Image (spheres, coloured by chain):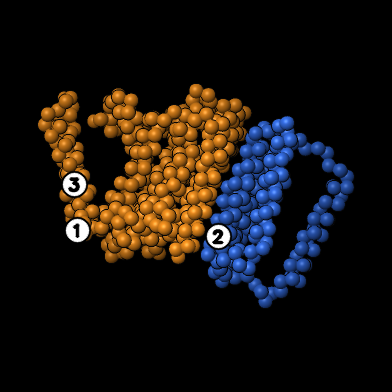
Chain colours: A blue, B orange
Amino acid sequence: MDGILFLIFAVVAVLCGINVVVQTHPISSAISLIGVMGSLAVLYLLLGAEFLAVAQVIVYAGAVMVLFVFVIMLLNAGAEARKGRSFMVQLLGVPLLVALLGLLAYFVQRLFPQTVLVQFGKFTGGGAREVGRALFTTYLLPFEVTSVLILIAILGAIVLARKELE
Amino acid sequence: MEFIVISLIKAAVVLAVLLTTLAYLQWVERKVIAHIQVRPGPYRVGPHGLLQPLADVIKLITKEDLMPPHASKLLFVAAPFISVTTALISISVIPFGPAITVAGHRTWMQLTDLSMGVLFVLAVSSMGVYGIALAGWASNNKYALLGGLRSSAQMISYELPLSLAIASPLLLSNTLSLRELVESQSATGSVLSWNILHGPFPQIFSFVIFLISAFAETNRIPFDLPEAENELVAGYHTEYSGFKFAMFYLGEYVGVTLNSAMLLFLGGWVAPWPAAYGSGLVPTLLFAAAGVIALSHGLRPARRRDRYSLPVFGIVFLAIAVLFLLPVVQGWLLPLFWFLAKTGALLFTFIWVRGTLPRFRYDQLMGFAWKFLFPIAVVNLLVTGLLVAWFS
């Protein structure tokens, strides 16, 4: 059951990911990206990371992508025109893609040998309690540094917006 | 197998009851608003307009389904479905009552209990924005687009104070599961252990913040700018007709009901004082009083048709009053009564506010969320966290 669900949502995630690039209209791409985020959330859930799954939906699908869609609607962006592709892309695109996928597969094989297979339902430390404890003990410094980083980003946005006003 | 059958039955019951309630909620809303504005409201279809919802449903289903030219077809059709689906999915984690035993099977009066229940509701309802935003965009209409834009900006803004207001009672109850949340509030069995009054820091502020944000999240007056009729015709659903329009309506009503049913503060199905002091008699007394009043008015009818309708209502109310006295059904009827009473009181507040408050201006709406509600919610969360840490 878990394996079937994993396959379904893995395929959906990849197909949506391809669709993000293929679609010419920004809104369609954004909606495909929401599909990717949602499928990823299901994959997290299958692996036992409940909190991460819900956070994925709330933060990425529910907040970040809403802002994306909002901005696309606000700018009223139209469909992109398909321009003629360069000769180099037509010649080298497919071979390079195959080479990249091969390299990735090779490194995954090397780094994670058969002995550490992922098993559904084995991981139980994905609840809010465990994640909270990890964030405030083991990963306290990265957690706080990230929050400062985000604060800086917000300040930067305000500074840029003020400049435009004056 | 048994689990699947029971779940299917429960889902069917919840859906049927919910949809009927929603249809009649619209009747209640029209009646209450009408009485606030000193007019009778729906009165023609059936006694006291009681068959009006049925007539409305038939009208909406049989209406012509229009598609505006140059609209994005797929998204135009998908948007109302997103709106309804996201609203309905969240109902699945709402607990209506404690565990009951029906025909030998012990089951909870809840479709499912997630360990992430509260976050699940937040996640699903945050997806509901897409229904409205995409409807506005796909309609190929300037009013609809503006309505969709306003709505998404408003829902993103008010989601912050809403989430922060929800976080504070979670600190008191120390759980994310909605069922455990309600159980933690039934400790003493009285109103004092509800989160709204429970120490170390009563959540009265976060309850008010939650309620205000809920109005904005569901796009209702005084925050109904996405469908402000004097500026935007009807906002995001300007181009929708027939059943698709009904789906938006349904989505909004489910959202309102859901927000009322999120009884994080009011103790869910728990009675306001212990049954030892007679809280079990309250529904009987209430329905008996309603029955007696209806009967006495029916004997001296003000209008001719009241001669038949009011005595019938009176007898029905008295029968319900007797029903609450039967020990067989008391076990599940009493929690359900308190759950519905609290939800109903909140729903009435929603309607009452709609009948009394004017609409905000758009800059006021945004300023209110970011400059007032958000800081207050943060301070409230901080104080709650400090006091919980201090006293535990």
What's the residue type where badge 3 is placed?
Leu
Give the letter of the chain under mark 1: B
Q: Which mark is residue B327?
A: 1
Farthest residue, direction right: A87
Seen at 59% across and 34% down, the residue is B149
Residue B18 position, x and y percent, is 37, 45
Q: Which mark is residue B285?
A: 3
Q: Is residue B274 above or below residue B242?
A: below
CA neighbours of label 2 inside 10 A, class few (<14), some (14 to 19), many (20+):
many
Q: Which quarter shows the N terminus of chain B?
A: bottom left
Seen at 22% across and 49% down, the residue is B282
Q: Is residue B219 above or below residue B2?
A: above
Helix or strand or loop: what does disc 3 sit on?
helix
* Mark whose residue sits in front, 1 or 3: 3
Q: Are marks 2 and 1 in contact (CB under 8 Å)?
A: no
Residue B198 position, x and y percent, is 38, 56
What whole-number distance in Å separates the C-alpha atoms at marks 1 and 3?
A: 16 Å
